[in-house]
Image (cartoon, grey):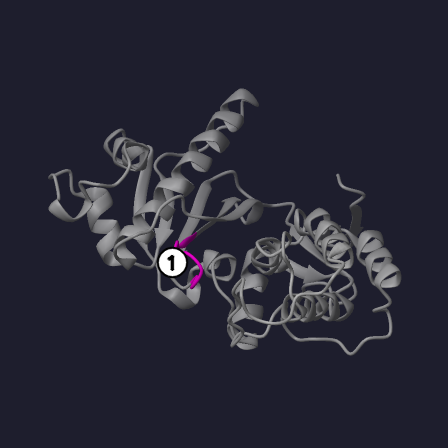
Amino acid sequence: MLNTSLASRSHVPLLAFPFVNGLELLEVTGFLGSKPASTPLDPSLKLNMEMGTAFPDPTSYRKIIGKLMYLHMTRPDIFYAVNMLCQFSHDPRDVHLKAAHRVLRYLKRTVGQGLFYAANSAFDLRGYADADWGTNTDDRRSISGYCMFIGDSLVSWKSKKQDTVSCSSAEAEFRAMAFATKEMIWLSRLLVSLKIPFQEPTHLYCDNTAAIHIANNFVYHERTKHVEIDCYKIRESIDSGFIKTMFVDSVDNLADCLTKLLHPTMFHGLIHKMGVCNIFQPPS
């Protein structure tokens, strides 16, 4: 499991954390003695491909990003930041390297961080979907993100730039819901193959009422007729009774930290709800 350590304590069944990988990365990059950062990236940071000064040898940047990509597969709290920085690997600038160093300083603060898996978790399937509409100034494509839970345990998360420009926030969120639906279908089939019962409908949470309306309204809309056919998979899943869409406030949308940079209070609140905790400060 990516050199991930598994720890258990009294009344705390399982905590998966890439402890060794994080320490090795800090040691190799010389950041073991760095000043810790409270979040992976500064929430006010706006990066693009043209800003900053290019440096002649981008190898150091690419090495850091490569190691962070390995780590972020077990660390949802750094997933969005690492994905953002990956976009600049072909022509990194000094500001991009500075941002990567910020992620390393966050790792210094959270070296013992991992995912908590409760022993008494049920097997109901639920997911959260979110989008960040058009904030990328390089191409204005939105970011889709989702996180999936089986019971109270986080089992899947992802964020990805959308394939095309969305014309509204509702359209971007609808695409994110469709993105999440495909993962929910796959997870449900996995549970079936393992002969693990789960109850339908599964719940998909979103913080955009317009997107939820589009997903549930089977009338042909002028505003969404150009949306790709595969996005309508969510309508089929709703019609079949597999998915029920649910509204959730943005402060409780756990996928929010996978699509945008957040201020420390909101960021730490969301990752705590996702089950991210520190082995040195186990949950009560």
Q: Relative to 267, is 115 above or below?
A: above
- Helix, strand or loop for the magenta stretch, by majority: loop
Of residues 140 and 192, the one drawn nearer to the viewer in this rendering: 140
**Residue at image coords 68%, 63%:** 283
At which x and y percent is residue 57? 76, 58
Q: Is residue 231 left or right of residue 41?
A: left
Report if residue 107 lies within the magenta region.
Answer: no
Of residues 127 and 151, the one drawn nearer to the viewer in this rendering: 127
Residue 15 visible in the shown view? no
**Residue at image coords 75%, 76%:** 36
Q: Relative to 35, is 177 above or below?
A: above
Q: What is the crowding at mark 1: few (fewer than 14 residues within 10 Å), some, or many (at least 20)?
A: some
At which x and y percent is residue 275? 60, 56
At which x and y percent is residue 54? 66, 66
Q: Of helix, strand and loop, which one carries label 1?
A: loop
* Quadrant assignment, res 79: bottom right
Q: Quadrant of the C terminus?
A: bottom right
At which x and y percent is residue 147? 50, 49
The magenta stretch is 136-143
Q: Is residue 174 left or right of residue 124?
A: left
* Mark 1 residue type: Arg
**Residue at image coords 87%, 67%:** 30
Q: Relative to 276, is 181 above or below?
A: above
- Per the image, the residue denoted by label 1 is 140
Q: Residue furthest front?
A: 56
Q: Quadrant of the N terminus?
A: top right
